[in-house]
Image (cartoon, rainbow, N blue to C red):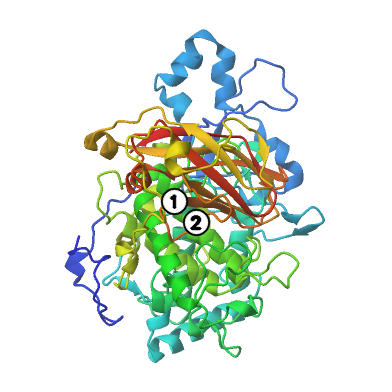
Amino acid sequence: MASSPFLSSSTPPTSTVPNSSTIIQTSFFPKTTQLSINKKLRKPYHSAPNKVAVSCKATNNGNQQNPTPSKKNAESALNRFDRRDVLIGLGGLYGATNLAGGDPFALAAPIEAPDLTLCGEATVTDTYHVYCCPPTSEKIIDFTPPSFKKLRFRPAAHLVTDDYLVKFKTALQKMKDLPDDDPRSFKSQAEVHCAYCNGAYDQVGFPDQNLQVHFSWLFQPFHRFYLYFYERILGTLIDDPEFAIPFWNWDTPDGMPIPAIYNDPSSPLYDSKRNVAHLPPVPADLDFNGTDRGLTAEEQIQSNLKSMYRQMVSNSKTASLFHGEAYRAGDAPSPGMGSIENIPHTPIHRWVGDPREDNGEDMGNFYSAGRDPLFYAHHGNVDRMWALWKQLPGKKRTDFTDTDWLDSSFVFYDENKNLIRCKVRDCLETKTLGYAYQPVDIPWLKSKPNPRKYKKKKGSRGVAKAAGIKSDVIKSVFPIVLNKIVRVEVPRPRTKRSKYEKEDEEEVLVIQNIKFKNDEAVKFDVYINDEDDETPTGPQDSEFAGSFSSVPHRQKSSAEITTGLKLGLTDLLEDLDVEGDDSIIVTLVPRTGKVTIGGLKIDFVSS
């Protein structure tokens, strides 16, 4: 582990670049065929039942051309069957058994890049809509990894040199000076996030389902590509192909406050719509509840480090726990967040956003978050967490190999105003894209949370008795509106597992059917075997299993989100010395907003 460039504690100058011979070589992926059968078939609105239409469309550079000029004529673009409808409708041979048997026609369902000609208004609230659609293009180019002589090193924002800052401010000012309708302009770059996150796009072939890049396995790859093109545009504007954007190093004490370079009102890096109570030198609260917790700076730092350990080490041992749940074509949006998207990504958005604004603008709402230059530094560190995660010990810390993830795609405008279609498989390594992160200290690796009070009573098997929890613990209360602290006893299917079994499968708490209004901020905390009936423990202690949090946004297909959450338990139960108990007590504590919980259960997740 010590040899990893990501985990090094040394801090070389930002100009230091490894020899080009160290660059990872990557293969180039072939373009799609020029004539193809569309496998995302859908029932036409006016066709007779049980008739199947299979369409062939000419492509331009691998892109299916959609002649539909506007949202009003979207119906003509949808005369194809949902592949699930086709197979189920055919019965027997193509029924559910065949679907489970691995038929590629049935199972291939990556999320496709949106059709820009069908982009519509983004929804902020029931009465507030914005237009953040990019220009359309008749030509879409498939992404190929860049060629480069040196890696670009993204520096920690609190460590940048004066020379670097001059270049960064010049580049960003040039981006802001571009006409608003230029897809490279700062306004256009900010609107990328708005369009992908607030319901401006439908899934291709599924007009009843919005495309959403949060709350699923698309979160990390989408934002990696988003920052990549933003960075390339900035470098081109100052004619510096080696320019790299900074990252907000909120996972180390010195880097936790908003970086000073973003706090100068005369700088293009400044944004006036930030919480004035959270300006430097106040350290960020990585588990922000919507109100400040009254901690000292040192207490906040220690809470943050322990929260980072939980999210990056004990609560992210598999791809699904780290990246989030699978999200395939035709699925409802928001199946479930991964560990880092949940905490600290979301609380930091809300911590920075301005509570004086109606919708928490800028950082506190998805539609406006990209308007704050700090957004890109924040997501730089989120992206860095993906790179770090794969360097941590554990055989299960590998990305998905599911082709529905690898072949999911997005479109972005590049530094030359070309519209580029990118697949997830093209961004799995930062070095493939020509950049890496400045090595810095990672103090949270040694910040494992400790149990607060609990000591298991010898010979005890009943968890309520063992934890000293009062007898008002209930076994079944779901669904519930989480408007008060709730304690639930949850049975464990397997209590005695070998070291090998624990390495092979992570025991997880599954919180099912979490429902809430998606234009409101929500958060609740989860504790395991916390014996304090009045004041549950905080993020710094082992009893704290994690949180659920959401940034306000809106999807026009629904005012309500239904999603889920998985929290790793294996390490936590060992730390609390209760891994032999046949049940655990789960405490749910509401923090912000109105949430309904559908159920709790224990499950096991493999790599």
Cβ atoms at labels 2 and 1 below 8 Å apart: yes
Front-most of 594 and 270? 594
Q: Residue furthest right?
A: 127
One can see residue 367 in this view: yes
Q: Which amino acid does label 2 sit on?
A: Thr
In the rendered structure, the answer to whether residue 372 lies left or right of residue 431 reads right
| Residue 144, visible in the rendered structure | no
Task: Tell me what residue is drawn at x 43 percent, y 61 percent.
Answer: 540
Q: What residue type is labelled 1?
A: Glu
Give the percent coordinates (x, y) of residue 172.
Answer: 53, 80
Q: In this view, does 123 lie above or below 440?
A: above
**In the rendered image, the vertical position of residue 396 relative to residue 448, given as above or below:** above
Residue 70 position in % (x across, y down):
72, 49
Q: Is residue 362 left or right of residue 428?
A: right
Residue position for label 1 = 543
Q: Residue 537 carries which label?
A: 2
Characterize the local packing of mark 1: few (<14), some (14-19) or many (20 or more) Cα atoms within 10 angstroms. Answer: many
Q: State the image coordinates of residue 189 (x, y, percent, origin top left).
A: 57, 67
Q: Mark 2 Cα within 10 Å, few/some/many (few <14, many 20+)? A: many
| Viewer-side residue, 414 vs 401 | 401
Image quarter hosting the C terminus: top left
Q: Which residue lies furthest to the top in this view?
A: 92
Separation of residues labelled 2 and 1 (CA atoms): 7 Å
Query: SS class of the residue under badge 2?
Result: loop
Q: Nearer the viewer, residue 277 or 361?
A: 277
Report the number of discs.
2
